[in-house]
Image (cartoon, rainbow, N blue to C red):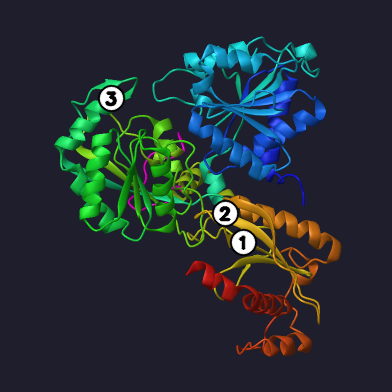
Amino acid sequence: MTGQLPLRPYQVDALAAVHAAWDRGVQRPAVVAPTGAGKTVMFSHLIKDHLRDYGSRALVLVHRDELADQAIDKIRQVAPDLHVGKVKADANEVHANVVVASVQTLTRSSRLAQLLDDAISFGLVVVDEAHHAVAPTWRRVLEELGAFTGLDEERAHEFDQNQPRVVGFSATLARGDGIGLGSVWQEVAYAISLTRLIRRGHLADVRGVRVTVDDLDLSGVRRSGGDYQAGALGDALLESDAGHVVAAAYLEHAKDRPGVVFTPTVATAEGITEDLNQAGIPASMVTGTTPRDDRRRIYDEFRTGLTQVLVNCMVLTEGFDAPWASCAVIARPTQSAPLYTQMVGRVLRPWPGKRDALVLDVVGASRAHKLATLIDLEPGVVRVLGRDQYLSDAVEEAELAAIADEVEREEYARQSGITAKDVDLFAASRSVWLRTDAGVWFVPVASGEFFLWPSSEPGFWDVCYAANPERGVKPVPWERLHERLSLELAMSWAQVEAEELDGVIGMISKKDASWRRGNAAASQAQVGYLQGLGYRGETEGLSKKDASDLISIAKASKKFDRHYRKAMS
């Protein structure tokens, strides 16, 4: 089993840009990448390379205690051989080679002193959700870590344990309160756009619907730090008919979609939850005070479909992954593009059967200030988004309009045009993904199958391997290689394992294998074998590639489906 997930091409470019910035003497570069770009994969590679090359320790800083566990979980999913310690609340594993620490905990001087009281200092500091770093608490922690000592350009290629290299990752290097980030982050070393990830199949395309509350007047709502003050906005929503309007809009536009609703206050969350349930839409609520066990139960009910809509009071804007959710209700109108980006980002991850992402933007009949909308996901590119228009289409139109030459426009449209709206999560894979009759996704290899199996925790997946049974020998039990992964990481690990094994014993799993090219007809042996497996479809004109896939599906269906149906019942 390999020790770490490989990087996607753009992730390779991002890390190369970070190293190039460090080499130029930039001590604190940043990477801007939308939710779903694989930030954890990127900084896990940085950490592993750092430990190999320098031997000093690495520190990952997160904003809140609850995000520390999530970060550790993701790092272990990406790089299982990294030994990670935790510093938050009642955990104090300060001497680990890789430490994930909550700034919320490190604001206490005694905890920060314990973290720094070690013979081997931190040579690499990774800041997750880097837009928080200008806050006084963050600045103090970073200063104590030596993050502002500066790298001398002549010595940038050298490693000084007293001068840590620092890197920040965020979906948006901007803050809603208008505070500039240049005092912490010296340079955006790499940025990738949302549309680029959509075009490559890494994110779902998105469109929006404006939900107008006729008696909601935002013009008189107090503002603070460049946005509506949460309490005043909550009062305005409660005084209006917003809850009933949101419930009606959900029934009209998203009745078959699992979704997440964002509200400014606990009272508005309670009201909208009640209105959704009364409209026949199963909804639950989480707030900052929801007990941990209750929150876990609510999340599980959301993952399993017992709850269709999860209403929250601004606690799910960061560190929450629900890729099966395909609707975001912004019942917290905002003028902050960064906040809006964080909210919408919760529903952009692909999921099997997920066609797109839908955003319901709650607005008043009149407003004195411009609200953030979907065009803020691609700032400066799109001026207006048409009714039911996908963001990717609007960006493509804007880019085509900027190209004067007709021949260039045609070539651009041919290369980058998006013709299908369905998110085929497996289409972008370099491996051949097939599905059994009952719905088990698998990658075939010469010796068996690598497949995805529902984890013991709803919403997560295990990566398993099933070897082909030898004639006359009892089948070997399935082997679980990786457990409790997000779908995206489970797919990636299955591909890595398949390629590692396939490279030794054959080329079954690769889409670009030479025997898959062209339309060579299926052999008589293939047709006979397929019919012997019970295939009753048309065989005339069947290609060698298609026959091979049908054989793989038939064999895997016999192997997995009975157990899968039982597990899902």
Mark 3 vs mark 2, CA separation in Å: 37 Å
**Residue 381 within the magenta-colored segment of the rendering:** yes
Q: Nearer the viewer, mark 1 or mark 3?
A: 1
Q: Residue furthest right?
A: 504
* Residue occupied by mark 3: 229
* Residue occupied by mark 2: 487
Mark 2 residue element: helix
Q: Position of residue 179 (x, y in %)?
A: 44, 17
Q: Amino acid at mark 2?
A: Leu
Judge the density around disc 3: few (<14), some (14-19), many (≥20) Cα neighbours within 10 Å.
some
Mark 3 residue element: loop
Mark 1 vs mark 2, CA separation in Å: 9 Å
Q: Are marks 1 and 2 in contact (CB under 8 Å)?
A: yes
Q: Position of residue 409 (x, y in %)?
A: 55, 50
Q: Which residues are magenta?
A: 378-391
**Above-or-below relation of 325 to 369:** below
Q: How many marks?
A: 3
